Amino acid sequence: MSTALQPSSQPKLASHVRLGFDRARKQYMLQVPEAATVLNLTGATTLHLCDGRRTVAEIVEKLRDRYDHVADDDVANFLARLVAKRWVELDGD
């Protein structure tokens, strides 16, 4: 597993992390042991695409198919923050 985020990196949620939807609050949640983080729709969509097979570059392209303004740096920074927290792992560099 690599620690540097590259366009060829293949991100996936760490085994101890769950992405879910809280029906009562109508919000996506990233759940880790003893904590939960509320996600906006773009963040949740990004993490749904992090399956360990798609590259960061492919994820950006998929997001561009869905949203008007997607910056490579915004996606990379979001994922890098989650890698730093060890909530996302990288394969394929």
Image (spheres, grey):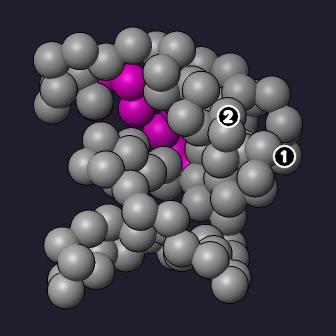
Q: Which residue is mark 2?
A: 80
- Relative to 84, residue 30 above or below: below
- The quarter holding residue 61 reads top left
Q: Residues within 10 Å of mark 2 (few under 14, many from 20)?
A: many
| Amino acid carrying mark 2 in the image | Ala
- Relative to 92, residue 1 above or below: below
Tell me residue 16's x, y (percent).
68, 77
User: Magenta segment range?
Assistant: 52-62
Q: Helix or strand or loop: what does disc 2 sit on?
A: helix
Q: Residues within 10 Å of mark 1 (few under 14, many from 20)?
A: few
Q: Is residue 18 left or right of residue 34?
A: left
Is residue 61 at all visible to an observer of this figure?
Answer: yes
| Image point (49%, 54%), residue name | 51
Q: Helix or strand or loop: what does disc 1 sit on?
A: loop
The circle drawn on residue 40 is none
Residue 28 within the segment the image draws in magenta: no
| Magenta segment, prevailing SS (helix, strand or loop) | helix
- Distance CA(mark 1)–CA(mark 2): 14 Å
Residue 59 within the segment the image draws in magenta: yes
Q: Which residue is mark 1?
A: 1
| Image point (22%, 78%), residue name | 25
CB atoms of marks 1 and 2 within 8 Å: no
Q: Is residue 50 left or right of residue 1?
A: left
| Amino acid carrying mark 1 in the image | Met
